[in-house]
Image (cartoon, rainbow, N blue to C red):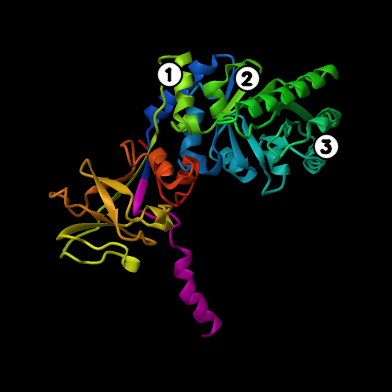
Amino acid sequence: MKIWQFFVFILPFSTLPLTHYNSRIEVDKKQFFENLENIRALIGPEKKFTVVLKSNAYGHGLVPMALLCQEHPDVNGMAVFLLSEACCLRKIGIKKPILVLGGYDIPLKEAIYHNIDVTIHDTHTLKTICTYAQKIKKVTRVHLKVDTGMGRLGFLPCKAVAAAQELTKSPYINLVGLYSHFSAANFDFAYTQKQFKIFQKVVANLKKVNINPPLIHLANSPIVLQCPEVLEATTMVRCGGITYGLYKEQYLFDTAKKRMPSFNLKPIMQWKTKIISLKKVPPKSYIGYEKTYQTQNETTIAIVPIGYYDGYYRELSNQGYMLVRDKLVPIIGRIAMNMAMLDVNNVPDAAVGDEVTIIGNRINIRARDIALQLGYIYLENLQSLNPAIPRTIV
């Protein structure tokens, strides 16, 4: 093949859309706002409330969720993991503070240009941001992260004061925040308390040298639900899962409910597709790859254009469910790359084009139920959803 023939062949494919329309994810705006208002009531009016939007907003869609956060007055700021995500949000018009939690996938100077808060978690990051700020001559907001026992990003407690002092030497650095991250807040209360005490000591040591960042944050979703003493010692919370109506263990929700009987959270996502084909197969028919399912009777099969490419776990083959005409129907056969098969014998009026709910608010198809069934955490379940699936606010 000559080189010009190659380009004639390949160029049409370069215009193919990244978004695919075999399914859609709906985000319930009203329910999201109700979740935010319940969390605000739980934490009180004085705390700064930052919503975590990392990993495509836990699968819900970075841009639509950021726009909702921008709109709601209870949200004071947002947090993402990657600097490129923060820059994207600035470019679409997000004005509220955005904190980057440590993923610097593009040059740090971009944070300065776009007025983005940055996490200082090691000496390299500290020196880099100070150098850029001095060169650009623009004041930059930074948060110092301390590793109190997670073993990931952050200065060790014994190094925190020196790092803070180094930051405050620069006239172009505004140390606005100090924070850490709990590693076992949902199940190991003793270790959580140990981390909390280490963090409090760091705060006290900073005060001794007259460094008092206004934003002290340590409370994540499990802490907000169960540890009011941590809330009292901080000035900001940063929540991910519970803002989307998700929590790991029921007891966390129940604990919050005891403190505030009116407290409530509900999932805000529904993932939907449509039946693309229906067929009846005779008894003893094999369904899907590898002959993992054989019909016992004549069976009506609905084919949906959803597979593991879309982020629907192959492990749900022969054990998952979807919702057709308000009835739960079982998945039969292996989930393939782009398709799954449903037994719709109990939905006699099923038709091509019917809406199918893959993840919703019914038992067995809730994100939490699917995660428990597979032995995963709900975060893994939702963040595996293909980013190309359209996210729509409803």
**Residue at the disc numbered 1:** 263
The range drawn in magenta is: 1-24
Q: Is residue 88 left or right of residue 276?
A: right
Label 3 amino acid? Gln
Rendered-image quadrant of the C terminus: top left
**Residue at the disc numbered 2:** 230
Q: Position of residue 27 (x, y in %)?
A: 39, 37
Is residue 208 something one can see in this rendering? yes
**Residue 93, image quadrant:** top right
Which badge, 3 or 1, is on the more N-terminal residue? 3
Pointer 1 local density, CA inside 10 Å: few below 14, some 14–19, many at least 20:
some
- Mark in the foreground, 3 or 1: 1
Label 1 amino acid? Phe
Q: Secondary structure at mark 1?
A: loop
Is residue 62 something one can see in this rendering? no
**Residue at the disc numbered 3:** 134
Asked whether the residues under the numbered discs 3 and 2 touch, taking CB atoms below 8 Å apart as contact, a structural biologist would say no
Return the mark for residue 332. none
Query: Is residue 365 one of those drawn in magenta?
Result: no
Q: Position of residue 332 (x, y in %)?
A: 28, 57
**Residue 285, image quadrant:** bottom left
The residue positioned 63% from the left and 20% from the top of the image is: 230
Which of the two residues, 298 or 155, is positioned nearer the viewer here? Answer: 298
The residue positioned 76% from the left and 27% from the top of the image is: 174
